[in-house]
Image: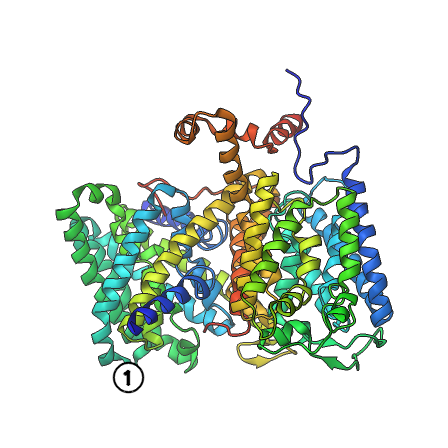
Amino acid sequence: MSEKTKKLSAEIKDSLGYLFFKNPVLVCGLVIGQLAAGCTNLQNGAALSITYLFIVVPVLVFASVIGKRLPEIIKTVSYMLVSAAMLIPAYYICGGFSATIFDSAGIYPALLAVSTVPVVYSNKFAEKQTVSKAFFNGVFLALGFALTALILGGAREFFGSGSLWGYKLSEGSFPAVKLPFWGFILLGFMAAGINAVRDIFKKPEYIVPQNEEERV
Amino acid sequence: MTYVAQFFSMMLTALFIENIIFTRALGTSWMFYLIKRPKEIVRYTLMLMAVITLSGAIGYPLRGYVYDSEYRHILVPMMYIAVMTVVYIVVYIFVKKVLPNQFEHFGMNLGTAVFNCAALGSVLVPAGERLDLISTLGYGIGMSLGFGLAVVIVGYGLSRLEYCRVPKIFKGVPIALIYLGLLSLAFYGLIGHQLPT
Amino acid sequence: MKEKLMFQNAPHVRQSESVATMMGDFVIALLPIYLMCFFYYGARSLVLGLCGVFFCVLFSLIGKIVVKERAKFDLTPVITGLIIPLLMPADIPYYIVISACAVAILVVKVPFGGTGNNLFNPAAVGFASVALCWPEVVFRYPAPMQVIEIFGESTAKIANSPAYSLAIGAVPDYEVLDMLLGSVPGPMGATNIFVVAACGIFLMVRKTINWITPVSFLVPYTLLSAFFPRIGGSPFDALCYELFSGTIIFGALFMLTEPVTSPKRDFGKFLAGLSSAIVVFLFRYFGGLEMGFANALILMNVFSPVFDDVCEEFLKVYRHKDGIVASFKKDKKQKPEETVEVNLIEEKIETKEEEAVK
């Protein structure tokens, strides 16, 4: 095993935590609002996940490549323009799955372009990382987000209207579950579930870096 | 006079019935950040108000060009993000030259104060409902005041959680989310059957 | 120094009673209301009550096992399970009661740490969540004086409740005396004002609930509804209809006075009652749901620490007698631990317990 692959595998292992024990939504508390209000069925969850993947990875890679060399004002503006431009491929990919997927998700996929990761994380974290680390971080952040969004969207669609991805499975029984407050409560219970699993495996608690220098 | 009435009715609607946090759920993570820094709330709320008003006013004449397009789901947010970058540059230069004291306070966070879901959402919602200029401005100001209100209410409630014997698995993010959800349920009593889209 | 003060969460007990007798009083006070429900609607109301109690106790046991809470079992889930069906129509399907109980116990009570720690009134949250979800079932009341089938689809005759008439701006066509006796359609426990009031007075005499909160809620509410009537006619009629429709009296006596979620000091209770009256009035006046009491109560629960703090500030000014400015200056220098001591709050027992565990 060469030095390079060793380093690469260490980076992947480090980023792997974003999938579950450092989940961006449930542990770091990052993209809560868009999920609670916008992720009301499985299709919306998929649309949000795809958009998030397309926004996060390019922005983080972009930040790690040329972030350091730019002055602050141009830096923030350029990150924003990159993430806004990335809405276009996300829109086309989502359109490939289903024609109405972006309509039904409303304004929420677009809001991901100004969520915490492109705005803050890129600014304060990704600039100091290597390109490969930033890439894997982005991928696993997006995958962790997708896991949460798909579970939440599936649960809400099943209990709310009794269907999954538009296919009717049973009679819908609890329509209020699609309201934002049930989104908050369900996300809270999912986060508690992660805490319970961490308790069982005796993993140490992940404390989100909060001070100005290393805030996520 | 009718303009004033329209402005204030829109503002109250945005403040209570369509509260930015409790019924629209925009900018929640940004709120959790601010709760830990109670001294910053007023500063960031004013900044949010300035950003929403400016970008709403600049975007209002421009949105006619993109709104009837086939690709409006993409073009409208992209147009508003572009408008907000202009606002960001203006605000950056203004704060740096005119209020250097405040610039130190904001520090690295000026970008976050301008680009966040609360700001973009509060200009996208009236654009989607095609409100006129007066209503857009009233809605934006109500949204930003509602944000400040929500931060104060949720922060106060979360400080009280310290006296509760919260079980170990619910400590931290989970209990904050459940608390926020229950608070949002209380605000839904105002809306009743008509749910926002 | 050994302290004689006992630090513990609300419900605080001032007499030679225990929490168990307090809760027992509550249960005893709710039983006559169930008797009236049996009189008006038949045995289904009793089965609904049993169902609520059974599922509340079951869910709280499940919650205790999941979060590994070691506290002893108490009667609070029984009270929650008795109150929830009383807020609903008598022909409510059982699954709605069960989901209200699940929300009340599993979302409101267990995550916050069980009895004495819940920041919101469990029954109010349970009712509000199902009222948002199935408003056409929860706000559709059967006419009284008919026996409703215990199981299966109800075939009872449906009638407009006074609260609904008020919400659409019409004068309810019921006599005021009928409303006092409870022979009008409405929530099955809240219509018979005489019985509810008698049970409330029983609780006040036993000092299980404080008289300040209901009085400071009902008097301003009465004045508000007399001065700003929603319907035509004399102010007295409007007042009676507003006060006796919906869950106002029942809520004021049994839900607003819950010891855990209401402020701790008397002046705080007064402030809470007054502002709840204003908020409930606004919710009923402008709100979308015809009965905003539960939602307004949740909102007021959020503010009850604010009332406690305001009250504390007043007391500090009163005690120091140095004027407001001096007390504020002092307040800034004080450390949080010292303010807690005045606050009668329970932090100390927690630290003691943690030491004991270690």
Residue nearer the viewer, C51 or C288: C288
Taking the spot 75% from the left edge, 46% from the top edge, the residue there is: C204
Q: Image height check: is C126 above or below B172? A: below
Find disc 1 in the rendering and name its residue.
B68
| Quadrant location, the C terminus of chain C | top right
Q: Residues within 10 Å of mark 1 (few under 14, many from 20)?
A: few
Q: Image height check: is A98 above or below C193? A: below
Residue A153 visible: no
The number of numbered badges drawn on the structure is 1
- Residue A167 falls in which quadrant of the image? bottom right
Q: Amino acid at mark 1?
A: Asp
**Chain hosting mark 1:** B
Image position, residue B118 (x, y; %)? 35, 60
C68 with respect to B46 (left or right): right
Image position, residue B194 (x, y; %)? 51, 74
- Residue B82 falls in which quadrant of the image? bottom left
B174 with respect to A115 (left or right): right
